[in-house]
Amino acid sequence: MNNTEATEIVRQELTKYRDRPYSELVTLVGTRIPTIVVTSASGVEYQVVVRVIWDGKPNDDIRVMGLIDDGGWRAFIPLSEDFITGPHNDISATW
């Protein structure tokens, strides 16, 4: 697996979640988001899994994790990227 290529792919997928408001991410906590398969420019098929979990106590910060592997040995220890957001980042919140 090309780690540079895989990192770029998983970061692209996480961008789709980073742009969402906190209130929308809350609805995804604990849900099963379908695994997607992305074919890279080099022709390698990567599996990307995104998980949305509380980063501590409920209704506080949320951690969004992206895990990626190429179906080989890396499936046992996938490459991962993540970010944390919280209610203070919710652009849809009313103050």
Image: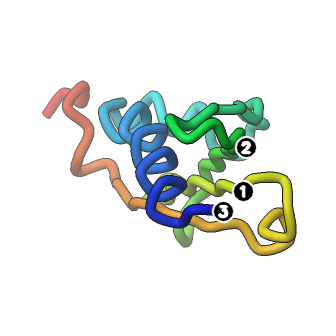
Mark 2, Cα crowd under 10 Å, few <14 / some 14-19 / many 20+, is: many
What residue sits 57% from the left and 59% below the top?
Answer: 54
Where's residue 90, x and y in %? 26, 38
Where's residue 73, x and y in %? 86, 70
Mark 3, Cα crowd under 10 Å, few <14 / some 14-19 / many 20+, is: some
- Pick the residue in front: 35 or 43: 43
Where's residue 88, x and y in %? 23, 51
Q: Amino acid at mark 2?
A: Gln
Q: Is residue 54 left or right of residue 74?
A: left
Mark 2: which secondary structure? strand
Reading the image, the residue beneath label 1 is 69
Q: Is residue 13 above or below residue 92?
A: below
For the residues labelled 2 and 1, say whether their Cβ atoms are less than 8 Å apart.
yes
Reading the image, the residue beneath label 3 is 1
Residue 12 falls in which quadrant of the image?
top left
Tally the marks.
3
Q: Which mark is residue 47?
A: 2
